[in-house]
Amino acid sequence: MNLYRIAAAAVMLAGLAACAAPPPPTAVDPYAGGRYTGAVPPGTLPGGSAEEFRRVAGDTVLFPENDATLDATARATLVRQAAWLKQHGSFSTVIQGHSDEQGTREYNLALGARRASAVQEYLILQGLEPGRIRTSSYGKERPVEVCSTPDCQVRNRRAVTVVAPGAGV
């Protein structure tokens, strides 16, 4: 009989302990009760990944032949990149400059460096800290495709923004 009382008391205590737990948090619907702007204060988003960066902002901008000028499409991509990087303040970047196969190795390394610098300068103008951005040039050494047609070569005239966790490089 005494064993039954102890067991009943244990069950009642377990039931009371379960009742004392706080309720699980409720999900907040950002669209309920007004217009959702999607605005998030800088540096407040948790996590993030290189894959998310590529999907949300795009990691590549293209350039005209023998040029390091940013066109409107490139600038729009860089605005998205800057916004993502501002929201994910724990990421640093390396801008990789590339060129097509035309010209000498030295010329293409210099052209890749100018392209990477153009992207870096634009991201800094968008409010990114210079210490989070590094540049490198691969010239014609790492083509997306080895080809000779103009339609194909344009894909090699690019700058690629590579992101990695770590606020400084």
Image (cartoon, rainbow, N blue to C red):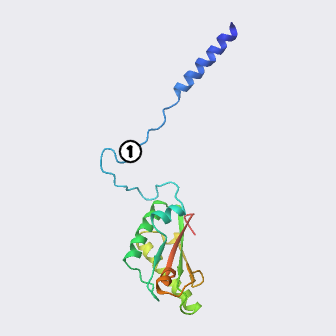
Residue found farthest to the top: 1
Q: Is residue 35 left or right of residue 15?
A: left
* 88 with respect to 140 (left or right): left
Amino acid type, mark 1: Asp
Question: Splitting the image into 4 quarters, where does residue 40 fall?
Answer: bottom left
Residue 147 locus on image (x, y percent): 55, 85
Horizontal and vertical percent position of residue 58: 46, 68
Image point 52% across, 25% down: which residue? 19
Q: On the image, which quarter does residue 32 sit in?
A: top left
Relative to 27, say whether 160 is above or below. Answer: below
Vertical order, 63 against 30 (above or below): below
Question: Which quadrant of the view contains residue 142?
Answer: bottom right
Residue 71 picture location, percent across and down:
39, 79
Q: Residue furthest bottom?
A: 104
Nearer to us in this view, 101 or 161: 101
Q: Is residue 43 above or below residue 159?
A: above
Q: How many marks?
A: 1
In the image, 117 versus 54, the foreground residue is 54
Q: Classify the position of the N terminus by image quarter.
A: top right
In this image, 11 relative to 112: left or right? right
Residue at x 52% of width, y 81% of height: 156
Query: In terms of secondary structure, where does tag 1 sit?
Result: loop
Vertical relation: 44 (above or below) 25: below
> Which quarter shows the C terminus?
bottom right
Residue occupying image coordinates x 56% and y 25%: 17
Residue at mark 1 = 29
* Residue 45: % across, % down: 47, 55
Q: Residues within 10 Å of mark 1 (few under 14, many from 20)?
A: few
